[in-house]
Image (cartoon, rainbow, N blue to C red):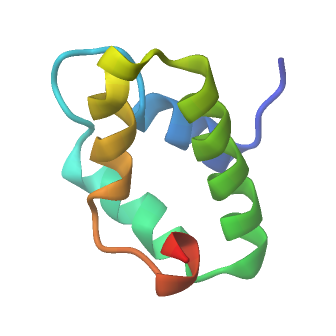
């Protein structure tokens, strides 16, 4: 499947690896939430990742949401 650059970054940040995403990647995603266009790429991908993963994999999603981001993204 073809993903935008930002969607790919969100997928990378929410992968199944036991370590967290790099702080630079997390900061880039957080900063991108201030752009309405990028926010509309980020939030659907996060939602998709929520629905793909089992309850035991909640940390993969939490790690992308835990970085400081736009309040619009967390409404």
> What percent of the width, then of the height, locates residue 57?
34, 20
- Dividing the picture into quadrants, the one containing residue 41 is bottom right
- Dividing the picture into quadrants, the one containing residue 38 is bottom right
Residue furthest right in the image: 2
Residue found at x 52% / y 41%: 9
Residue found at x 78% / y 72%: 37
Pick whichever, 40 or 56, lies toward us: 56
> What percent of the width, then of the height, locates residue 4?
76, 42
Looking at the image, residue 58 lies above or below residue 18 = below
Residue furthest front in the image: 55
> What percent of the width, then of the height, locates residue 46?
58, 44
Residue furthest left in the image: 19
Quadrant that contains the N terminus: top right
Residue found at x 27% / y 37%: 21
Residue found at x 42% / y 68%: 30
Q: Is residue 37 left or right of residue 60?
A: right
> What percent of the width, then of the height, locates residue 15?
41, 22
Looking at the image, residue 50 lies above or below residue 35 = above
Q: Is residue 2 left or right of residue 71?
A: right
Quadrant that contains the C terminus: bottom right
Pick whichever, 15 or 65, lies toward us: 65
Q: Is residue 2 left or right of residue 11?
A: right
Looking at the image, residue 24 lies above or below residue 12 = below
Q: Is residue 4 left or right of residue 34?
A: right
């Amino acid at each position: 499947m073809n993903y935008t650059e930002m969607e790919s970054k969100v997928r990378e940040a929410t992968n199944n690896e036991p370590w967290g995403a790099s702080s630079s990647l997390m900061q880039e995603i957080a900063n991108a939430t201030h752009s309405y266009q990028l926010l509309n790429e980020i939030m659907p991908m996060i939602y998709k990742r929520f629905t793909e993963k089992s309850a035991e994999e909640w940390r993969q999603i939490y790690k992308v949401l835990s970085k400081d981001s736009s309040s619009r993204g967390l409404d």
